[in-house]
Amino acid sequence: MPEPILSVSGLTKTFKLRGREDVRAVRDVTFDLLPGECLGLIGESGSGKTTLVHLITGLTPATSGSVVLDGLDVTKLKGKALRAAWKKMQVVFQTPTESFDPRRTLGDGICESMRNNGLSKADARKRAGELLERCGLPADFAKRYPHEVSGGQCQRAAIARALAIEPKLLICDEATSALDVTIQAEIIELLRTLRRELDMSILFVCHDIALVRQFCDRVLVMYRGELVETGVPAEVIAEPKNAYTRDLINSIL
């Protein structure tokens, strides 16, 4: 069994609210994600999925627990060591335009991380064009602004941006939910191809169980901040063991 690319252990987040009872948004979450694996994370709105992503990516500090990324406990790293570790993980968000500065071109956004890592301006622009083409867009889309492209095209550009520093783990946080069904299928096929060609792991956060069944190797079910069930998607959907999972599946399928 290979070492996990991501290992989450006992991850907990409690929000302290002035004059009100503390809210535990994520409770003792533990799971592993293996190299090359696609792991789905499902749950209704408010179940804690987005907070969990924010804890994993360091956007929100954890109250307790650990996140080990490619063998390094990133919850204990600081400064340059932490920035170096985060290069191994990138996020594609639900609303693709949020990945880009509206005042700058798509190419500028894609080049930014490469320039920050020492690549020359010319080499970064060449690489940006290559990444756009790999994600199914013409290289000259680098000259366009986010408002000049469709939602599906912008999401392809956002994926190109995420690939710029060659991450080992791609987190897709509802990355297809804002797209119509046809474009959604195209993005899923793109992710499937990239995962295979780049041997990349994916954490696929989604509320669409049918899509998770089609795309993911395993699935985690989250409810009120806790993981309540895990397994192969087809088995979890066909024979859910947890009452919440049964209700969630019955409400959607």
Image (spheres, grey):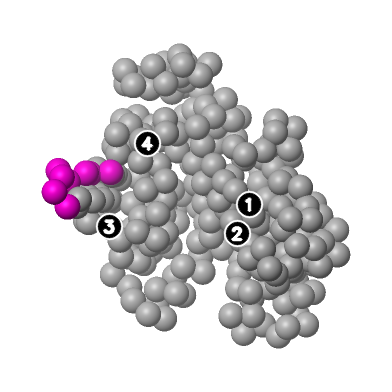
Rendering coords of residue 220 (x, y %): 41, 35
Task: State the residue position of label 1.
Answer: 96
Decide: marks 2, 1 in contact (CB < 8 A)? yes
Q: Name the amino acid type tagged 2.
A: Ser
Q: Name the amino acid type tagged 1.
A: Pro
Looking at marks 1 and 4 on the same chain, the residue that comes earlier in the sequence is marked by 4
Task: State the residue position of label 2.
Answer: 99
Task: State the residue position of label 4.
Answer: 46
Is 211 left or right of 43, judged from the image as shown? right
Q: For the point 42% across and 46% down, which residue is it?
A: 50
Magenta part of the protein: which range? Answer: 18-25
Looking at marks 3 and 2 on the same chain, the residue that comes earlier in the sequence is marked by 3
Q: Give the crowd class for mark 2: few <14, some 14-19, many >=20 residues within 10 Å.
A: many
Measured Cα–Cα span from mark 4 to mark 3: 18 Å
Q: Name the amino acid type tagged 4.
A: Gly
Looking at marks 4 and 3 on the same chain, the residue that comes earlier in the sequence is marked by 4
Decide: marks 1, 4 in contact (CB < 8 A)? no
Reply above or below: 211 against 22. above
Q: Residue 62 has which mark?
A: 3
Q: For the point 53% across and 16% down, which residue is it?
A: 253
Rendering coords of residue 233 (x, y %): 49, 27
Q: Give the crowd class for mark 4: few <14, some 14-19, many >=20 residues within 10 Å.
A: few
Q: Which dot, 3 or 2, sits closer to the camera?
A: 2
Measured Cα–Cα span from mark 4 to mark 2: 23 Å
Measured Cα–Cα span from mark 2 to mark 1: 6 Å
